[in-house]
Amino acid sequence: MWKIINKNKIDGLPKSPGVYCFKNKRGEFLYIGKAASLRERVKSHFQQLNFKDGLFVPEAEKIGFIETDSEIEALILESKLIKKQQPKYNTVWRDDKKYFYVVISKEAFPRVFLLHRPAQQAIGPFTEGQPIKKTLRFLRRAFPYYTMRIHPRVKCAYCNLGLCPGPNPNKKEYKKDIKKLVSILKNGKGGSLIKSLKKEMEIAARKERFEKAAKIRNQIAALENVFAHARILEPAFGAAALPWDYYQTEKKLRKISNLKKPIARIEGYDISNIQGRQATASMVVFTGGKPDKNSYRKFKMKLQGKPNDVAMIKETLTRRFKHSEWGFPEIILVDGGKPQLNAVIKTKNKELGTKNIFVLALAKKKNELFIEGKKKPILLENQSGELSNLILHIRDEAHRFARKYHIKIRRESYFK
């Protein structure tokens, strides 16, 4: 199944879509990925080394690849192979709650939707949201499906676009279409299904069921177009490559933090309130230097009535640390100075599994960065632009998210 080459022969890789893997000298799978162009994607791991690549590329000895006929087939195949092989560095960065799964409900008229957790008979896992979302959008043109539990009695907006079966579909035909959709999502291949549809169309035409034949003809055209032209994967130096070198920035962050392990996840926290009223807190998550908005969390403070940011940040982290299923970060950044820093340190030292989290606090006035274990803060203006921008981005994003929730709660209180 896999074609194996030495890592110094990347130029021999094809430019076609497919799935690739990195293996160590013992033949163990380190990482599995998908690509619109196998050659360019694998090259990018060596040419633009980010913090993830820095973990597995030096350990890799061999590269395996499987060519596919389409990007959709590459997406589906990657999902199956990750599930089967459990590569070390795919599972390091993701848990079940961060993968994507396609769920087909068991209702009379099944719905199709995405979840972040494995459900019974769910299809997946898929490592990224955008490619599987694009795939579902393309396939919906061939096999319109429901996403809502109860459809209105009249046509909805998706009906007018030909993406929804409408308020009164034929139940038997609808379920047949869902089975065809599931078939593609499970094996990624459209060829055999297209052949089957062509036979169905011929039979319908012979029986003079011209409306059904026309519907199948349209499905065939939509599928042929999807598998021939659908672009669902980012190019090697598109969104998959960071616009700045996180690998180098992460090294600088490790240096000021005295951390030896890679920094994959950073969490930022802020408090928003007016004199202690309608107080809220935010938790934002940055993975690989980029916001991971699916992992953001918000908190409504139980402590209300008096402005006490230190007590509130303590409450926030106490509640957050109860959720080990969210995964823990390497670094926590809080808005504030020495008091906030100390509050987080005391809180994390009381909990199991959190003592190794490193804590930073950023004071607004001079952008002084207080560092766990160091007496004096450092000025961000004296650090590299990339490191400074990353820390400010996390702080500002935490502030924005906390304030957004605070404003929502204030508005709701006006109508009580």
Image (spheres, rainbow, N blue to C red):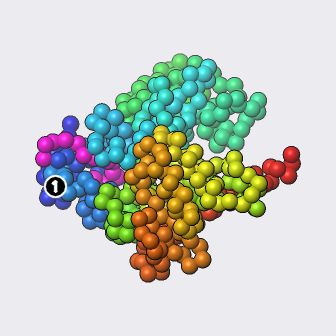
- Give the extent of the magenta segment: 25-42
Q: Is residue 305 left or right of residue 84?
A: right
- Image quarter of residue 169: top right
Horizontally, is 269 left or right of 18 in the view? Answer: right
x, y percentage for residue 117? 49, 35
Which one is in front, 336 or 51?
A: 336
Residue positioned 52% across, 48% down in the render: 295
* Front-lying residue, 42 or 328: 328
Task: Using the rendered image of the protein, determine whether residue 219 is visible from the camera's viewpoint.
Answer: no
Taking the spot 86% from the left edge, 48% from the top edge, the residue there is 415
Above/below status of 256 relative to 28: below
For this orientation, the residue located farthest to the bottom is 382
Residue drawn at x 44%, y 64% is 372
Callout 1 secondary element: helix
Left or right for 74, reference 11 = right
Please state the horizontal and vertical placement of residue 262, each as a whole percent of the image.
33, 57
Q: Which image quarter holds the N terminus?
A: top left
Residue 196, image x, y percentages: 41, 26
Asked if the magenta segment contains residue 276, the reply would be no
Mark 1 highlights which residue?
Answer: 7
